Amino acid sequence: MSDEFVYTAEAVTDDGESHVLDLEEHGWADKELLARTVRWSIVPKVAGWPIVVVHIPTGGKPIFKSRVFRRMSMYLDGTPTGFRCYAIGYFLSGKSYWTWVLPNGAIEVGEDPVLADALLRNL
């Protein structure tokens, strides 16, 4: 499993301008830019992953996270069995709203990616 992110982000601001952000770079979460973001997307760097788009309501702050799921066992070549899931969404009035994408292309909405455990069991 590679630890490199398979996604970049795109923030479209209230003036219609598009900003591509490298989520692995320090400082991508510019407060002024995110405060003006009305559409928040993750765009795959590699084939096989879907584009995910979230519209940010007035007063919402765009958010991003990734989570690694691993088993204690390893593949025969010694690499860990596991994968990374990605989530985008927004924070509004003290609550987070998440849209997850899993490596099989499944999209989930919620605090955690429920299907990730089933995928991990089937590795």
Image (cartoon, helix red, strand yellow):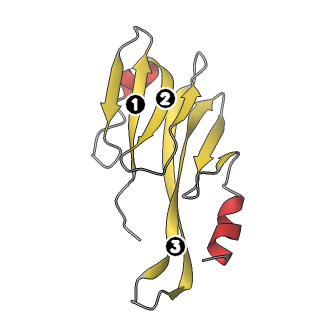
Element marked by disc 2: strand
Q: Which mark is residue 52?
A: none
* Cβ atoms at labels 2 and 3 below 8 Å apart: no
Q: Is residue 107 left or right of residue 31?
A: right
Q: Which mark is residue 10?
A: 1
Q: Is residue 106 left or right of residue 18?
A: right
Separation of marks 3 and 1 at Cα, in angstroms? 27 Å
Residue 93, horizontal then vertical, whole percent: 66, 27
| Rendered view: 58 above or below 63 | above
| Amino acid type for the residue under numbered disc 3 | Gly
Element marked by disc 1: strand
Residue 45, horizontal then vertical, whole percent: 36, 46
Residue pointed to by mark 3? 82
Q: Is residue 30 left or right of residue 71?
A: left
Of residues 61 and 121, the one nearer the viewer is: 121
Residue 17, horizontal then vertical, whole percent: 35, 14
The numbered mark, 3 or 1, whose residue comes first in the sequence reads 1
Separation of marks 2 and 3 at Cα, in angstroms? 27 Å
Element marked by disc 3: strand
Of residues 92 and 113, the one nearer the viewer is: 113
| Amino acid type for the residue under numbered disc 2 | Trp
Residue pointed to by mark 2? 40
Label 3, residues with CA under 10 Å away: few <14, some 14-19, many ≥20: many
| Amino acid type for the residue under numbered disc 1 | Glu
